[in-house]
Image (spheres, rainbow, N blue to C red):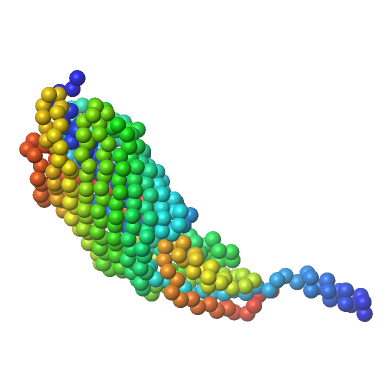
Amino acid sequence: MKPKKNTLTALATLMLASWAAPNAYAHDPVFGLGPHTLFKGGLELHAGAHQEKSDSRNTEAELELKYGITGDWVAGIGTGYGRLEEDGDTQTDRTPTTLSSKYRFWRNDMPGAQESAAVLGRVILNDGDVGHHDVSRQGEDYLAGLTYGYEGRKWYRWASIRHRFNRDGANGAERPDKTKVDLVGGIRFTPTEYREPDWVWMLELNYEHTNRTNRVVEGLSRELGGDQLFLSPGLMWTYRNFAAKAGVQAEIYEDFPKGQETDDYRALIELEWHL
Amino acid sequence: MKTLLSVIFLMALATPAWSAEYRYELKVDGLACPYCAYGIEKKILTLQGVKDDSLDIRLNEGLVVFDAENDKRISEAALKELVNDAGFTLRGLETRVLGDEAH
């Protein structure tokens, strides 16, 4: 049996890691959500990696394939591989398979700009949770979100809200739901043309709320949940049908019960091809 | 006389359909980023008769220009659907014949 500290660390890390699964579409924010979809019949190959550092270090790489059902509706499937380093011990395994879909229900196209809104859903299957076997889930988790975005030749802005419905742990332990709200601004300093490399710089404000709950772990009562606010600089680089983006989340505010593990930082890098 | 008419008839049958090279200028709304515009390129290059190297996407003008050689012009309705499938809106279209008719 693992020491108590490992179990508690695993619980907190599972909640954070499972939340941080990339939801990326290239011209969307790095950590937040945007309404960007894919052209009809188009394929998108997406590879991403993120790292979280706290008492443990969790690194995950994800591969996702998306298909444009229409110009405003996209569906995707993804999976990944994770590595958890904790107290000198390293565990590696598959991360859960995800099924996702996004539908852009409103679009206002203007000369040189696009304003739109979308809903999205994601199912996180219960088929992999690296390093968290002792708190495996009873079933699938679900995520639902709503997002708005304005994309111009120079300025960008996004707003989004999403809620993750977490299944309880296999041992009956409650895994609290999470809500996340994102506000993002972006700028393209030079309005590049189609066949030129393109840079967009972003600054995100990411708020996360985890429902509070009490959990007894190995006879020890533990309060989980709370609020966090992050400031996250990021950038997107694209060239024709290839995109790369990266960002770092730095915590600027937290309200968690004492002793609960939180991340020192989170970093994310993603690559994407449209085919 | 019969022979002459027969020869003319056969020559008429043997003549290929008249085709012409057209230039299409599409005013497209929503074109904000180069990466998103790739869908337009993919869609246009699936059209029959399009000359690949003629495709020019001018983001700062919101303009998509390409040449295509066809028996008849590509309809505005077809181009509107194509642009919508790429995730944008066709606001205006200008088409003109390039040079002399071929064949």
Hey, which residue is sitting farthest left in the picture?
A258
**Residue at the (84%, 76%) spot, across then down:** B8
> Compared to A217, does A155 lie above or below?
below
Tell which of B99 and A84 is nearer to you. A84
**Relative horizontal placement of residue A182, taking residue B61 as reference (left or right):** left
**Residue at the (26%, 44%) spot, across then down:** A164
> Compared to B90, does A181 lie above or below?
above
Residue A62, image x and y in percent?
33, 41
The count of marks equals 0
**Relative horizontal placement of residue A154, taking residue B66 as reference (left or right):** left
Could you say which quadrant of the image residue A37 lies in? Answer: bottom left
Could you say which quadrant of the image residue A173 lies in? Answer: top left
Tell which of A1 and A91 is nearer to you. A1
Hey, which residue is sitting farthest top in the picture?
A1
Residue A180, image x and y in percent?
22, 50
Residue A2, image x and y in percent?
18, 22
Instruction: Name the image quarter holding the N terminus of chain B.
Output: bottom right
**Residue at the (43%, 74%) spot, across then down:** B91
Is residue A115 visible to us here? yes
Is residue A61 visible to us here? no
Instruction: Name the image quarter holding the C terminus of chain B.
Output: bottom right
**Residue at the (42%, 71%) spot, across then down:** B28
**Relative horizontal placement of residue A176, taking residue A152 as reference (left or right):** left
Residue B44, image x and y in percent?
51, 64
Tell which of A4 and A170 is nearer to you. A170
